[in-house]
Structure formats: C-alpha cells, structure tokens
Image: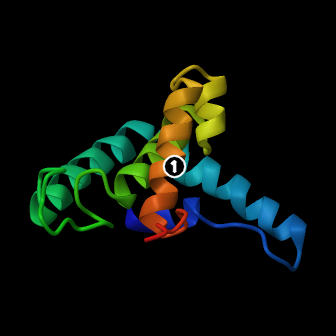
Amino acid sequence: MVTKTSLLESRYLSGERELFAEFREQFENECVRGREGEYVSWRLANQVQTQTRYGGSVFMQEPNVKNGVGGLRDYHNTLWISYFKERINTTAKLVDARFLRDSERRALEKSYDFLCGSAPKCNI
C-alpha cells in the first residue's frame, strides 16, 4: 500500500512521455481499479494509527506537523483517498465535484501552505 501511494504521487518530468503514460495506465489498471476499498480502508486505519502515535489532538504543545492531527498527512490522505474513490487529485477538483465548498478549499490550501512554511512572515 505504501508503494501504491508512492506510485500515485509520480509525475512526468522528462524523457519518454509515452512510456510515462503507459506506466500511469498500467498503474491504474493493476493497482487502482477494483482495489479502491482495500486502499481506502488501509489508508484510514494507517491514519488513525499514525495520529495516535504522534498525538491524537490538534491541541498538542509540540505538534508533529507531518503526522499529527491536522498535519500534512491529513491533507495528503484527503487527496490520496479522493483519487482512489473518485479519480480526483486536486482540491479544486474536489470543489468541482461538490465534495468541498470553495471557502473550505481556500482554508485548506492556506493551512497547507502554512504547514509547508510558505505563509507570509510576521513583521515584528
């Protein structure tokens, strides 16, 4: 399942575009179709296990930004599960499909940017 997640994140950068397209098609046919429920169940169980290990609350004094509740993995899990369930891989497409409101998407993206460190700096 971890490998499926890594393959899901693959992006074409350079080289034979046709080879990459063939890889994506084969990945879809052999790793995604018909295995959606298995992946989503594993992903949800893994999320609970990870959050329990790294703090099961958003009110931690020293939160784990990557794996804690409300951390980067929650954002990633949303997109990974969305892909396996609906073939949606962006928050904008979640809005188009009416899974999120645009205001929720903006808040989610703003939070993600903050966790990644690209939020505007405070002027003290």
Query: Going by the picture, which residue comes out furthest to the front?
Result: 124
Q: Position of residue 43 (x, y in %)?
A: 32, 50
Q: Nearer the viewer, residue 53 or 9?
A: 53
| 40 to 12, vertically: above or below | above
| 108 to 76, vertically: above or below | above
Q: Quadrant of residue 54?
A: bottom left
Q: Crowding near pointer 1: few (<14 within 10 Å), some, many (20+)?
A: some
SS at badge 1: helix
Query: What coloring was used for the rendering?
Result: rainbow
Q: Residue at x 35, y 51 (%)?
A: 74
Q: Residue at x 59, y 27 (%)?
A: 102
Q: Position of residue 101 (x, y in %)?
A: 54, 23
Q: Position of residue 82 (x, y in %)?
A: 50, 38
In the picture provided, is 33 more to the left or to the right than 75? right
Query: Going by the picture, which residue comes out furthest to the top?
Result: 98
Circle 1: residue type: Lys
Locate the C terminus by quadrant. Answer: bottom left
Q: Position of residue 20 (x, y in %)?
A: 78, 67
In the picture provided, is 124 more to the left or to the right than 64? right
In the picture provided, is 49 more to the left or to the right than 22? left
Q: Nearer the viewer, residue 65 or 53?
A: 65
Q: Residue at x 24, y 55 (%)?
A: 46
Residue named by callout 1: 110
Total count of labels: 1
Q: Residue at x 30, y 66 (%)?
A: 65
Locate the N terminus by quadrant. Answer: bottom left
Q: Nearer the viewer, residue 85 or 96?
A: 96
Q: Quadrant of residue 3?
A: bottom left
Query: Going by the picture, which residue comes out furthest to the bottom?
Result: 15
